[in-house]
């Protein structure tokens, strides 16, 4: 005579199998969802890096164009002296009061 398994054992095996299948399904869903989110984050980071490279390349092209641009003659009555490097940013005394910031009185300076 063959011994049949008890109802308690069959229910236990069936419940464990069902729980295992649910956990495997949840794990697979979570993995796929996390992978998709991770890909979106990497794509956004890649797009940001590409945008920064475009800006940098544009800036470098502008610098190259500026370096190789022809020099324009400076006007003779320039407000800024063009002598030595130390006085390159010193305003000339003859035109010092000619142009001032709006709202300021050149006589007070």
Image (tube, grey):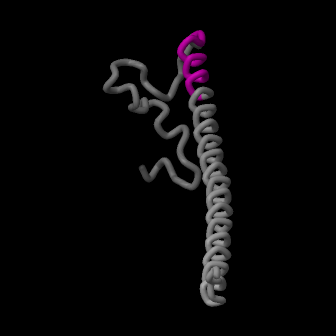
**Vertically, is 12 above or below 45?**
below
Q: What count of labels does the image hold?
A: 0
Identified at 34% across, 26% down, the residue is 87
Classify residue 98 by image quadrant: top right
> Is residue 62 part of the magenta span, yes or no?
yes
The residue lying toward the viewer, choosing from 91 and 21, is 21
- Tell me residue 34's x, y (percent): 62, 58
Question: Where are the magenta residues, as a range?
Answer: 59-70
Q: Residue furthest left?
A: 86
The residue lying toward the viewer, choosing from 36 and 23, is 23
- Tell me residue 11's x, y (percent): 66, 85
Most common SS among magenta residues: helix
> Is residue 108 part of the magenta span, yes or no?
no
Identified at 64% across, 80% down, the residue is 2
Identified at 62% across, 71% down, the residue is 20
**Vertically, is 39 above or below 90?**
below
Tell me if I can see residue 75 in this picture. Answer: no
**Vertically, is 11 above or below 50?**
below
**Vertically, is 106 above or below 74?**
below
Classify residue 64 by image quadrant: top right
The residue lying toward the viewer, choosing from 80 and 43, is 43
Tell me if I can see residue 76 in this picture. Answer: yes
The residue lying toward the viewer, choosing from 97 and 42, is 42
Quadrant where the N terminus is found in the figure = bottom right
- Tell me residue 31's x, y (percent): 62, 59
Identified at 65% across, 83% down, the residue is 4
């Amino acid at each position: 005579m063959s011994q049949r398994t008890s109802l308690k054992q069959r229910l236990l095996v069936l419940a464990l199998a069902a729980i295992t299948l649910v956990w495997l399904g949840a794990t697979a869903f979570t993995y796929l969802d996390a992978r998709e989110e991770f890909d979106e984050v990497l794509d956004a980071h890649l797009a940001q890096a590409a945008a920064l490279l475009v800006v940098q390349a544009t800036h470098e092209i502008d610098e190259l164009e500026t370096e190789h641009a022809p020099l324009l003659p400076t006007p003779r009555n320039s407000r800024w002296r063009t002598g030595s490097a130390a006085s390159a940013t010193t305003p000339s005394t003859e035109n010092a009061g000619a142009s001032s910031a709006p709202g300021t009185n050149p006589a007070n300076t």
